[in-house]
Amino acid sequence: KNEVEQSPQNLTAQEGEFITINCSYSVGISALHWLQQHPGGGIVSLFMLSSGKKKHGRLIATINIQEKHSSLHITASHPRDSAVYICAVSPTPYSGAGSYQLTFGKGTKLSVIP
Amino acid sequence: EADIYQTPRYLVIGTGKKITLECSQTMGHDKMYWYQQDPGMELHLIHYSYGVNSTEKGDLSSESTVSRIRTEHFPLTLESARPSHTSQYLCASSSGSTYGYTFGSGTRLTVV
């Protein structure tokens, strides 16, 4: 079982729809990251959070540490939001040599249709 | 502007050639990483470094090697490229587990 599970794997939405992508993890973490990867391949870091909620423009990320769950919301979706959204976690600090590495989910491919 | 740079962006090369993928960052991050990603698949860590003269292999076995002689530079080398090395290679850096990561634009390598 993967330590980081994302759902859905694929998502198609009409422009303007409210979108939610979910991420569940099974390990202790110091932070959770939401990343965006466009078809060109480069990755952009959207959020890093360890508690609560963060907002940037039309994007909102929340995390529930007790339930080991995070969600990424996109309000008023637009075709330019089409990308793969990746959830990744940083393990709990002081857990050894690998403690600075990220563990990645498989990603959610989002397509927003005009 | 602080950033991380990867070159080349795309590379098509013949089997048996030696190649070096460049990665440089201007943020002074001590931790740097190389990830390999096949199309439609998740990223896998192949090398990481926590500082100058420190390099370790990641979870995914790779025939590539890395060096970290300067804080800002973390090149990846394939001594003899093979078609099985065809993939996207992404470089990243961070200053700690509770700080953000910065990713490069990636190098898409095709070995023919």
Image (cartoon, helix red, strand yellow):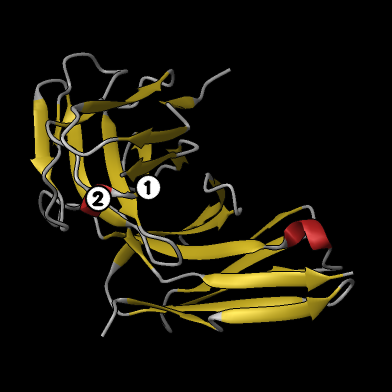
Q: Amino acid at mark 2?
A: Pro
Q: Is residue A52 visible?
A: no
Q: Is residue B73 left or right of residue A59?
A: left
Q: Which chain does the numbered disc 2 sit on? A: B
Image coordinates of residue B111 in percent, x first then y, are 30, 43
In the image, residue B12 above or below residue A31: above
Residue A17: image location, x then y, percent? 85, 77
Residue A41 visible in the snapshot? yes
Mark 2: few/some/many CA within 10 Å (<14, 14-19, 20+): some
Residue B47 appears left or right of A45: left
Disc sitting over residue B98 in the figure: 1
Who's the residue at 28% across and 34% down the image? B32
Q: Circle 2 sits on which residue?
A: B83
- Residue at image location 59% in from the left, 80% down from the top: A10
1 and 2 marks on the same chain: yes
Residue located at (84% from left, 63% from top): A78
Find numbered disc 2 in the image and state the secondary structure of the residue it sits on. Answer: helix
- Indicate the secondary structure of the residue bearing disc 1: loop
Q: Which amino acid type is shown beneath numbered disc 1? A: Thr
Tag of residue A53? none
Residue at the far top: name it: B70
Of B60 and B2, nearer the camera is B60
Looking at the image, is B55 positioned above or below residue B39?
Answer: above
Dot 1 surroundings within 10 Å: few (below 14), some, or many (20 or more)? some
Q: Chain of mark 1?
A: B
Query: Disc 1, disc 2: CB below 8 Å?
Result: no
